[in-house]
Image (cartoon, rainbow, N blue to C red):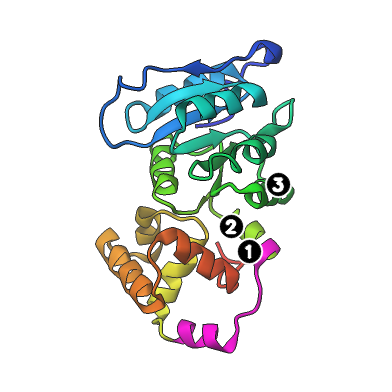
Amino acid sequence: MSAEGKDDADARGTAHAVVCNQSARPGPSPRVVVVDDHGLFRAGVRAELGDRVSVVADAGTVEDAVRAIEQTTPDVVLLDVHMPDGGGVEVIRRVLPVLPSVRFLALSVSDAASDVIAVIRAGARGYLTKTISGEDLADAIVRVAEGDAVFSPRLAGFVLDAFARAPSPGEQAELDQLTAREREVLQHIARGYMYKEIAQRLDISVKTVEAHVSAVLRKLQLSSRHELSRWAIQRRLVNLDGP
């Protein structure tokens, strides 16, 4: 999916929230609110996601977004970073204190470090650029709903720079438990790569990637890929000069 197709003629002042029939798509798929100030882009996101997730509402302004989120209490809010009335950070600032269970995933044309860091500091669980495919976007939404942190490749490095610190001796001892291959997999997860991408980059099977992740979780006594990503970022395990 790309930013092309966003229609500058879409009147920002008339953007409004559209709440869908929440019973129309049964099943365990994550419930999502799409927030972007261009109506054609919101429609494009709906079309790309299809029935992989359940889009329960969309909104084109901060006010409409807050209202739609409060009305539907989604699992994930797919959020544009830049909007005329405050953008994604303002939506998170107003919603998160009253609905802490809602998770936010930024989707933006911008890959500027300042934008990534600002929205993550506000409370978003991930940041994707609008070049992502519909299939990968749906997979990212599911991962965020499950508690993971998701980033487009290379963007995790910005978060690393902002939040990283040197490991303590105890943390280094934890790291020493991991094999070289487990560290490789862990670094890729911290960068935001999906299992199938890690498998391709390391020339191993997806099942082997899953086995390495399970081993790392067990050794570090962590319970999710989100915790694993945070653990790696805190300990500066991502090589910013790497691919």
Q: Main secondary structure of the magenta part?
A: helix
Q: Residue at x 49, y 55 (%)?
A: 192
Q: What separation in Å lies between label 3 and label 1 (alpha carbons)? A: 14 Å
Question: Residue 44 location in percent, x, y?
Answer: 48, 22
Amino acid of disc 2:
Ala
Real-space Cα separation, disc 3 to disc 2, in angstroms: 12 Å
Asked whether 171 falls inside the magenta stretch, the response is: yes
Is residue 214 left or right of 191 when viewed as pictured? left
Q: Is residue 45 above or below residue 112?
A: above
Residue 1 x/y as whole percent: 49, 32
Measured along the vertical axis of the image, is residue 132 above or below residue 236? above
Residue 74 horizontal side relative to residue 166, left or right: left
Residue type, mark 1 in image: Leu
SS of the residue at dot 1? Answer: helix
Residue 62 shows up from this direction: yes
Q: Disc 1 marks which residue?
A: 160
Circles 1 and 2: CB atoms closer than 8 Å: yes
Sequence-first disc among 3 and 2:
3
Of label 3 and label 1, which has the lower sequence position? 3
- On the image, numbered disc 2 is attached to which residue? 156
Q: Would residue 188 be visible to someone looking at this image?
A: no
Report which quarter residue 49 is drawn in: top left
Horizontally, residue 233 falls left or right of residue 57, namely: right
CB under 8 Å between discs 3 and 2: no
Q: Quadrant of residue 23?
A: top left
Give the residue drawn at x 59%, y 15%.
16
- The residue identified by callout 3 is 112
Nearest the eye: 187 or 16: 16
The magenta stretch is: 162-176
